Image (spheres, rainbow, N blue to C red):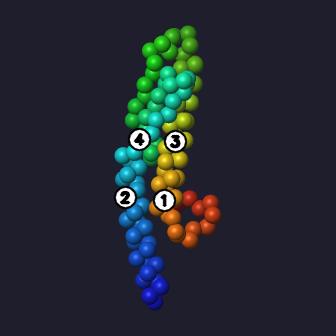
């Protein structure tokens, strides 16, 4: 029965750490860029976009599609960085837990 109580305490501590991590991920910002930095996107580590900066030289009406592609690329870059940041923090949180390889948290 002691093992069960120990497991329950570990689960409760993990739940608290997960809640803290989720709150922390709302505060961490990552930036993505494309076009040599001419388009920059800022988002939280949870993936909520906070802002976008576009170099004025890209505001050419005939080249709208290029600008659209750069915005998409910058968003994807920022999202990739956000996911990497989340994975780093999750790895730190779950260090020492007997989780199967490849299992991702949160579920």
Q: Which residue is mark 2?
A: 20
Please rate how many residues cluster around mark 1, counting C-alpha atoms within 10 Å: few if below 14, some from 14 to 19, many from 20.
Answer: few
| Distance from the alpha carbon under mark 3 to that under mark 2 | 20 Å
Per the image, label 3 sits on a secondary structure element best described as helix
Return the disc, 4 or 1, that comes first in the chain's sequence.
4
**Percent x, y for residue 31?**
46, 35
Marks 4 and 1, how far apart at CA: 18 Å
Q: Are marks 3 and 1 in contact (CB under 8 Å)?
A: no
Point out which mark residue 81 bears. Answer: 3
Camera-nearest label, 4 or 1: 1
Tell me which label, 3 or 1, sits earlier in the chain. 3
Q: Position of residue 50 (x, y in %)?
A: 39, 35
Disc 4 is placed on an element classified as strand
Q: Secondary structure at mark 1?
A: helix
Q: Is residue 48 visible?
A: no
- What is the CA distance from the residue labelled 4 to the residue labelled 3? 10 Å
Q: Earlier in the sequence, mark 4 or mark 3?
A: 4
Question: Crowding at label 2, few (<14), some or many (≥20) Cα neighbours within 10 Å?
Answer: few
Mark pair 3, 1: CA separation: 17 Å
Tell me where residue 42 sits by quadrant: top left
The residue depicted at 47 percent of the width and 28 percent of the height is 40
CB of mark 2 within 8 Å of CB of mark 1?
A: no
């Amino acid at each position: 029965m002691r093992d069960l109580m120990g497991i329950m305490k570990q689960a409760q501590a993990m739940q608290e750490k997960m809640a803290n991590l989720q709150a922390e991920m709302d505060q961490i910002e990552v930036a993505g860029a494309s076009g040599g930095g001419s388009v920059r996107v800022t988002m939280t580590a949870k993936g909520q976009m906070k802002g976008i900066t576009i170099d004025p030289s890209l505001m050419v009406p005939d080249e709208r599609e290029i600008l659209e592609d750069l915005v998409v690329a910058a968003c994807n870059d920022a999202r990739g960085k956000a996911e990497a940041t989340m994975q780093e923090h999750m790895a730190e949180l779950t260090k020492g837990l007997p989780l199967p390889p490849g299992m991702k948290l949160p579920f």
